[in-house]
Image (tube, helix red, strand yellow):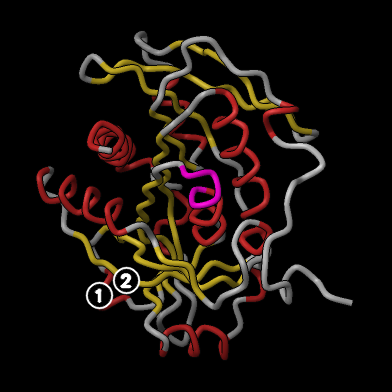
Amino acid sequence: MYTIFQRAEISEPALFSPFDTTRRADDFPEICVSTFSENIIQKFSSLNTTEKIAELYTANGITPIYKIRYKNTAIAFYQSRVGAPACAAGFEEVIAMGAKKFVLFGSCGVLDDARVKNNLIIPTSAVRDEGTSYHYIAPSAEIEADARAVQILENVLTNCGCSYVKGKTWTSDAIYRETISAIQERRQEGCLTVEMECASMLAVSKYRRIPFIQFLYGADNLSSDTWEIRDLMSYGLTNAEKYMVLAFECGLAM
């Protein structure tokens, strides 16, 4: 028996697609931004200039999609669900609604505290330790980020005066199975961070040919012998405005 992890090619076509399940929305903004923090989404959705324009539906409930005007440009935004399959499904559905450019940001575990500390992280590639990406791109150990997207993100962060570091991230499906041996192995391979979505999102963006940018900010620290929870409890609220504005700027620059 061959699983998706052993197949050399991605078979076509799928029995159904997001374009069969999701209705195209009138005047859906070309630029779409997403993050995982409920606090950040609530903060920006409560602004007077924000309006709800659509919804994503799952058995877990309804996810609103909002529209905001930033520098005279309409930008959609919504809260992504955590984990590669759910995050990728939402991405697929907003593409079906009409999104043509996508920016994602969120927190991550830090594997190299010396390099990451006080910096935003630009993933240049992702180790594919999840399953979703293999349904979109043929098997490989890693998936590369688009060079143009990385350059745009670098330019935006530089122009906004934000320090950053570039490097490899490790995308895992199992947050409670980040074993000590696996962490050491990934660190030796040059991974700066660990998260649960980047590899799959890069794969979907390549498959659908949608320009995609992702940046990360450090949360818990896994680079020492003892796990440090750090600011994971705050879920990024402290820098909510900065992160969202950076994402908006990336969207405009794409």
138 or 174: nearer the viewer: 138
Across and down, in percent, residue 226 comes to 48, 82
Residue at the right extreme?
1
As drawn, 249 above or below 128: above
Name above or below for residue 11 compared with residue 41. Answer: below
Give left or right: position of 15 versus 86.
right
Which residue is painted at 54% across and 44% down in the image? Answer: 208
Which residue is found at the position 21% from the left and 60% from the top? 164
Q: Position of residue 157 (x, y in %)?
A: 18, 49
Q: Which mark is on residue 105?
A: none
Against 75, is 171 above or below? Answer: below
User: Is the stretch drawn in magenta largely helix, strand or loop?
Assistant: helix
- Label 2 amino acid? Gly
Which comes before the other along the chain, label 1 or label 2? 1
Q: Position of residue 162 (x, y in %)?
A: 16, 51
In the visual, does 189 lie left or right of 133?
left
| Secondary element at tag 1 | helix
The residue tagged 1 is 115
Residue segment shown in magenta: 205-209
In the structure shown, which secondary structural element does the residue marked by tag 2 occupy?
strand
> Which of the 4 quarters of the picture holds residue 176?
bottom right
Q: Does residue 206 show up magenta in the picture?
A: yes
| Residue 17 relative to residue 43: left or right | right
Instruction: Judge by depth and name the residue closer to the eye, 54 or 204.
Output: 204
* Quarter of the image with the N terminus in it: bottom right
The quarter of the image holding the C terminus is top left
The label shown at residue 167 is: 2
Q: Amino acid at mark 1?
A: Arg
Q: Check if mark 1's residue and mark 2's residue have beta carbons within 8 Å.
A: yes
Instruction: Please name the residue shown 25% across and 75% down the image.
Output: 115
Between 225 and 92, the one lying in front of the other is: 92
Q: Residues within 10 Å of mark 1 (few under 14, many from 20)?
A: some
